[in-house]
Image (tube, grey):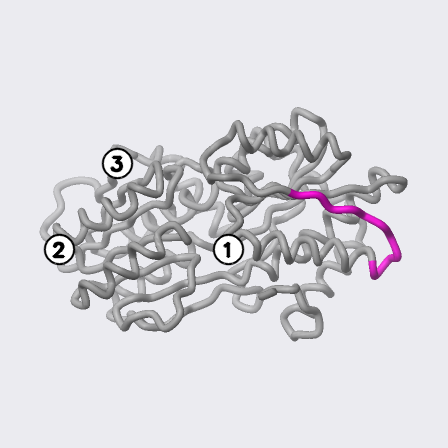
């Protein structure tokens, strides 16, 4: 599945994301039966993570299924309802959005337009209407073992004052799901091995401010953090570059950022993956085949490989087998319920 995610990113990069604010299938397109519209989350599609992963799955589905697919990116959250309205005015059969910032607009649109189908990725509505499908990810299940790994690495680098940290996006539930479980993963390491790894962290005010991400990472580095987990969109990407500049280590998010941001690949221990691209592709494939479970919430978790940890890449030989075995045991414990991630709080 990780190879599939990498393949999807290669496809997106080769196509150059062809962002003229929308994408269309190449060549003359006969009027198709199904018209699918994607509204990107704030920050644009070229974020090397969340939005780009969704777009890549969308492109792959557009190539594999004879549907008319169009995508409109959102630079800011205020673009999202405008883009939804565009698809409604043009009578698209399905409109897909993603993230907390889209939730109010998509819920209102779904309630006002019962004849249109809607999808929101990475958000779970309470009792969604019959024409809205929610797809969410139990990312705490992959963030927790990332915390364990970060704690081990920090202790291995400085056993006198080991510190790990995080730079998160705005403090919404979907971001706290990362930070709470990551923190609990650090605590699990401390309790298991009787260590004292500290954790420091901060939340950004947006997902699109790389300079803010760099400043926040710098503040954690000054507190002696040797490993920083970033989960803040483009803001987090700025943090990754600052960590590399400082000669420290990081954990990426959403996709295997060793591939999506190769410039920082040398400092990434792993990435905390959400299979957004694969989820997008699967939903659209099912929709083409008249399978649309509107009014429900579907989940990606460790058991169905909807979330997970990326390979260790450069650090595969530096992380001992005992730590890898411990991580596998943690994942097994999470899946069978004997280990709790701390989420929901």
Q: Residues within 10 Å of mark 3 (few under 14, many from 20)?
A: some
Q: Residue at x 17, y 55 (%)?
A: 92
Residue 244, position as x, y percentages in the image: 65, 29
Give the CA distance from mark 1 to mark 3: 27 Å
Label 1, on which residue? 174
Residue 194, position as x, y percentages in the image: 88, 57
Q: Nearer the viewer, mark 2 or mark 1?
A: 1
Label 3, on which residue? 21
Tell which of 249 and 190 is nearer to you: 190
Cβ–Cβ below 8 Å for labels 1 and 3? no
Q: Residue at x 65, y 33 (%)?
A: 266
Residue 65, position as x, y percentages in the image: 26, 56
Q: Quarter-wise, where is residue 91 in the image?
A: bottom left
Which residue is situated farthest in the left direction here? Answer: 31
Give the CA distance from mark 2 to mark 1: 31 Å
Residue 6, position as x, y percentages in the image: 49, 46
Label 2, on which residue? 91
Q: Which residues are magenta?
A: 191-201
Sequence-wise, the earlier of marks 2 and 1 is: 2
Q: Quarter-wise, where is residue 327 in the image?
A: bottom right
Judged from the image, the secondary structure of the residue bearing numbered disc 1 is: helix
């Amino acid at each position: 599945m990780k190879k599939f995610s990498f393949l999807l990113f290669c496809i997106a990069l080769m196509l150059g994301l062809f962002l003229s604010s929308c994408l269309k299938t190449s060549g003359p397109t006969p009027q198709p039966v199904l018209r699918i519209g994607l509204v990107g989350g704030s920050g644009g599609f070229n974020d090397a993570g969340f939005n780009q992963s969704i777009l890549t799955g969308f492109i792959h589905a557009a190539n594999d299924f004879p549907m008319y697919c169009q995508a409109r990116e959102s630079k800011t959250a205020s673009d999202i309802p405008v883009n939804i309205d565009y698809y409604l005015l043009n009578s698209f059969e399905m409109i897909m959005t993603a993230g907390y910032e889209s939730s109010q607009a998509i819920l209102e649109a779904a309630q006002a337009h019962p004849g249109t189908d809607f999808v929101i990725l990475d958000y779970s509505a309470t009792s969604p209407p019959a024409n809205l499908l929610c797809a969410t990810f139990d990312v705490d299940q992959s963030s927790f073992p990332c915390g364990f790994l970060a704690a081990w690495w920090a202790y291995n680098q400085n056993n006198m004052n080991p510190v790990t940290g995080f730079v998160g996006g705005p403090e919404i539930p979907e971001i706290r799901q990362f930070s709470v479980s990551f923190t609990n993963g650090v605590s699990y390491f401390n309790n298991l091995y009787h260590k004292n790894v500290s954790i420091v962290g901060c939340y950004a005010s947006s997902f699109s401010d790389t300079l803010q991400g760099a400043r926040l990472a710098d503040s954690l580095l000054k507190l002696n953090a040797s490993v920083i987990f970033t989960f803040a969109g483009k803001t987090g990407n700025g943090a990754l570059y600052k960590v590399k500049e400082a000669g420290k280590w990081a954990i990426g998010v959403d996709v295997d950022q060793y591939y999506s941001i190769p410039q920082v690949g040398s400092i990434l221990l792993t990435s905390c993956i959400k299979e957004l691209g694969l989820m997008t592709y699967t939903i659209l494939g099912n929709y083409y085949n008249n399978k649309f479970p509107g009014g429900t919430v579907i989940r990606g978790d460790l058991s169905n490989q909807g979330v997970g940890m990326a390979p260790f890449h450069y650090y595969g030989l530096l992380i001992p087998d005992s730590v890898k075995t411990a991580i596998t045991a943690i994942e097994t414990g999470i899946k069978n319920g004997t280990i709790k991630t701390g989420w929901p709080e």
